[in-house]
Amino acid sequence: MSEASETIFSKIVRREIPADIVYEDDLAIAFRDINAQAPVHILVIPKKPIPKLADAQPEDQALLGHLLLVVQRVAAQEGLTQGYRTVINTGEDGGQTVYHLHLHILGGRFMAWPPG
Ligand code: DGP
């Protein structure tokens, strides 16, 4: 998959393609993963198209922290009181397929360890 910064997630941010959006603020948006791997599977993304975690810069520090607080908020909104897993796939070995930074929230079932 290419690392062009314009991805399908930018189109979701701009409402050019539909998504089941569960949260939005000035900096971030969260929507249900189209290929859910758990009863709850949501992606939290920055509106700024950072391709992958390895590309984030020191000036993104506050944004990265904000994304974690959005994860916390969305998980609470989804009723994930038993816990949840947060995953950031980075690059080829990380299994990343969409090159717009995103945090997976997986919940609603027990998450095995180690992951595949
Ligand atoms: P990753 O492997 O970490 O890059 O995960 C990308 C995720 O994005 C994958 O779980 C499927 C999801 N996805 C890909 N295209 C779309 C889409 O058009 N809409 C939604 N809602 N999710 C998508």
Image (spheres, grey):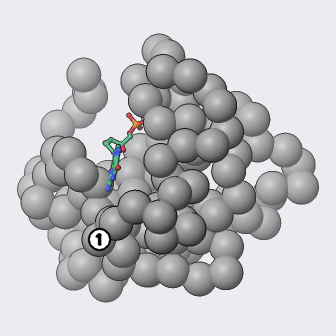
Instruction: Determine whether 70 is above or below 86 in the image.
Output: below
Asked if residue 17 lies left or right of residue 90, the reply is left
In the rendering, at what x and y percent does residue 17 appear?
Answer: 40, 61
Q: Within 8 Å of ligand 1, the CB of disc 1?
A: yes
Residue at 54%, 66% (x, y): give it.
13
Q: Return the residue nearer the eye: 22 or 66.
A: 22
Residue at 11%, 60% (x, y): give it.
39
Q: Quadrant of ligand 1?
A: top left
Q: Return the residue nearer the eye: 65 or 13.
A: 13
Q: Report the residue that reaches farthest toward the top.
A: 93
In the rendering, at what x and y percent does residue 20 appear?
Answer: 29, 71
Residue at 26%, 28% (x, y): give it.
115
Instruction: Determine whether 55 is above or below 37 in the image.
Output: above
Asked if residue 34 lies left or right of residue 109, the reply is right
Q: In terms of secondary structure, where does tag 1 sit? A: loop
Amino acid on which the number 1 mark rests in the picture: Asp
User: Dot 1 corresponds to which residue?
Assistant: 20
Q: Report the residue that reaches farthest toward the front.
A: 16
- Location of the C terminus by quadrant is top left
